[in-house]
Image (cartoon, rainbow, N blue to C red):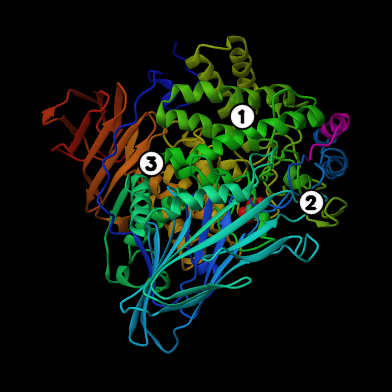
Amino acid sequence: MRLVLGFAGFALGFDPTVWARPQSTPAAPTQAAVLWYTHPADKWENALPVGNGRLGAMVFGKTDEERIQINEDTYWSGGPYSTTVKGGVRALPEIQKLIFNGELVRAHRLFGRHLMGYPVEQQKYQSLGNLVLTLAASGPVEGYRHELDLDTAVATTTYEQGGVRFRREVFVTPVDQVIVVRLTADAPGKISFTAQLRGDRNDAHSNYATDYFQMDGYGRDGLVVRGRSADYLGVAGRVYYQSRLRTFPTGGEMTVTDDSLLVRGADAVTLLVAAATSFVDYKDVSADPAARVDAVMTAAAGKSFSQVKAAHVEAHRRLFRRVAVRLARTANSDLPTDERLKAFDGTNDPDLAALVFQFGRYLLISSSRPGTQPANLQGIWNKDMNPMWDSKYTTNINTEMNYWPAEVANLSECAQPLFTMIRELTDRGADVARENYGARGWVFHQNTDIWRVAAPMDGPSWGGFTTGGAWLSTHLWEHYLFTGDKNFLRDYYPVMRGSAEFFLDFLVRHPVRGWLVTNPSTSPENFPLAPGNDPFYDEVTGGMSAGTSLVAGSTIDMQILNDLFGYVAEAASILGTDQEFRARVIEARARLAPMQIGSKGDLQEWLDDWGQREKSHRHISNLYGLYPGNQISARRTPKLAEAARVVLEQRGLAGNGWSSAWKAASWARLGDATRAMDNVAYAIKNYTTNSLFSLCSRAMQVDGSFGLTAAIAEMLLQSHENELSLLPALPASWKDGGVNGLRARGGFEVSLEWKAGALTGATIVSAGVRSCRVRAAAPLNVTSQGKPVRLSRPEPSVTEFQASPGATYVLSVAAGPRAPSTR
Ligand code: FUC
């Protein structure tokens, strides 16, 4: 049965069968795959990240005292706990009444008393420690180079000192689950150093002394740190961890003292670091870290360095080489990466955007693999015991953005940790739904930690975002659109359904306008200029607040629910299940508050045309419906698209890394290549560390890096309108180029070539039997295995043909006049 719900997307017309993933041909190494420097990192944010999804390391590349900072993705403060508070639902009717009456600050006070989770804050992601190598060689250093090869996932430092050329390689292998450090020199007997494995203590949240960690020698070739997580917010630290070093020198001597390991006069040395915790899942911390480390270490120690490295590089390339981007190189492209960034003016080094694009893919591969934790605010790389925003999962944009590139940049399996987290959130989420809102299903707000707590956190203005779980659930549907994996859809349908079920209970009729709305609701972190929403002293945070963000029926809430309900209905139809429930969500969907255009021509952020306190607020929540959602479109809804454009104009360029990335993707959806590129360039110039990490304020935050990858993909290929749109927002400075291996909804894999700003050819591999509709600036001819394919051209810029599974279609530009425009 086909369902037409009035929202566009591939769901509308495709045959809901499972299709096989097209075989991606590993692309040749991209030209844009190396970050390099002529000096070591001066600070942690500029060190080079390596990781295998579970273990992360930041490599400084120093020549006197090398520091390799280490993370393990399950090392968090505290232990299993819940923040759900019982009985808040009793205050809900009064809070809703106050909000509908416009008494927002009074509603805020009541929310603060009755609906906040307890503890109000959540746990923190921790640094495991540092491997410090005090190197014996001294004297002036020459010919220094520190680099990260994105194609091999190896960080390498090379230099000459005292007439000897030294080389240090560092990588974290997903195959053998260890951090590998290899030291070599071009002369025998020249490698001497002292190694320490140093723990990190959270002195703000735990008592001092060796209760928290101990450092010891281990056997005749190793070191060990054993510890446990800090107590925090009254939650006892129950994560036990161990990290262990083993050293394999060739030649020379090795000694182990109390807490140090000395190597003298070796020809070459391999260091392996294994690390594990007692974490099993968000409720269970009963594993034995020592046994886990033993198992990994024993297996890895039996292999040679070259075996371990070869397996690592192969495993990495299997994912990384699926996509290659080629943009023009200039003289600037050959500069060291930090100088290249400084010299970038937005147009003088097109290849830099390709490097940034691949860096985001590299980070996702390195911080999120099947079976690991999802990428948090800092991926897996965090040096602090009290990091910015606890290095948690923030779900009013950040965690979602981390996974924007996963499907389109051909790393679908890297999103699996996110899907597991969403499912786990339904547990506490069901408790909060019942206790706070008297509702069935599950709800999740704006932040969680490894313990998967789900109640409102930090304060009503942040915690009042009830659609965090619904937004995450849209990723489940997107995964289905890209992969066509019906088993996946069946498996996760109950999660999506549970989110929709919550909202069927929670939505209330607006007393004046009659629409169904969320109440309480927020438009993330944006304070409306609503009457009476004045500064006040907030007893929850113990500080002045500029007002409250609590409202009813924010635009983003309505857009997210419009998507969620549509997706659930569509999924129920595809799976042939749940007809009664499906009818209910379709009915509720039709009654949601619509998008509205305000007096300034902008898309309203709230039900009322209030305007906002902070003019260029970094969130563009009301544009969820443009990107990543699909309710605003230049072709389908031109008035709303124009209203979205007004919002983007009004917000301008400034914000932070993730904000620029979101704006770039939004401009790409509007088909405005110049403005999309302005935002990409602004992010690169203003919110990027030397090692290409994105910045939020001054904090390293990976969302912006992932967001830029997604935005750049969106400039080259779009697939949200039931068709493949080729080069929908190609900036003038990317005149000539090519991309291989992008993925599109409907299960296509797409490669493109262009010259002088115009498409010259494309290759499409189809995974299923389906109609393939392609939009490009020029009419296209299509062949498969050298033979012309029957096609139709419903519009000059649209070419349509029937695709078969596994077949490759070669598209070339047909002779004749160029179609006027793709938009
Ligand atoms: C949201 C953003 C902040 C920051 C934080 C982690 O609260 O508004 O800018 O990114 O998440």
User: Which image quarter: residue 776?
Assistant: top left
Q: Does residue 777 lie above or below 654 as drawn? A: above
Q: Does residue 94 lie above or below 235 as drawn? A: above
Q: Does the residue labelled 2 lie within 8 Å of ligand 1?
A: no
Residues shaded magenta: 83-96
Q: Is the magenta stretch mostly helix, strand or loop?
A: helix
Task: Pick whichever, 475 or 491, lies toward us.
Answer: 491
Is residue 111 in view from this perspective? Answer: yes
Instruction: For marks 2 and 1, give the CA distance.
Output: 26 Å
Please indicate whether residue 810 sits to the left or right of residue 200 in the image. left
**Residue at x 53% of width, y 53% of height:** 55
Query: Horizontal and vertical percent for residue 23?
Result: 29, 34
Residue at label 2? 547
Query: Horizontal and vertical percent for residue 692?
Result: 46, 63
**Circle 2 — which element?**
loop
- The magenta stretch spans residue 388: no
Residue at label 3? 410
Where's the C terminus, which quadrant? Answer: top left
The tag earlier along the polypeptide, 3 or 2, is 3
Q: Is mark 3 within 8 Å of ligand 1?
A: no
**Circle 3 — which element?**
loop
* Closer to the eye: label 3 or 1: 3
Residue at label 1? 561
Amino acid tagged 2: Gly
The tag earlier along the polypeptide, 3 or 1, is 3
Instruction: For marks 3 and 1, give the CA distance.
Output: 27 Å
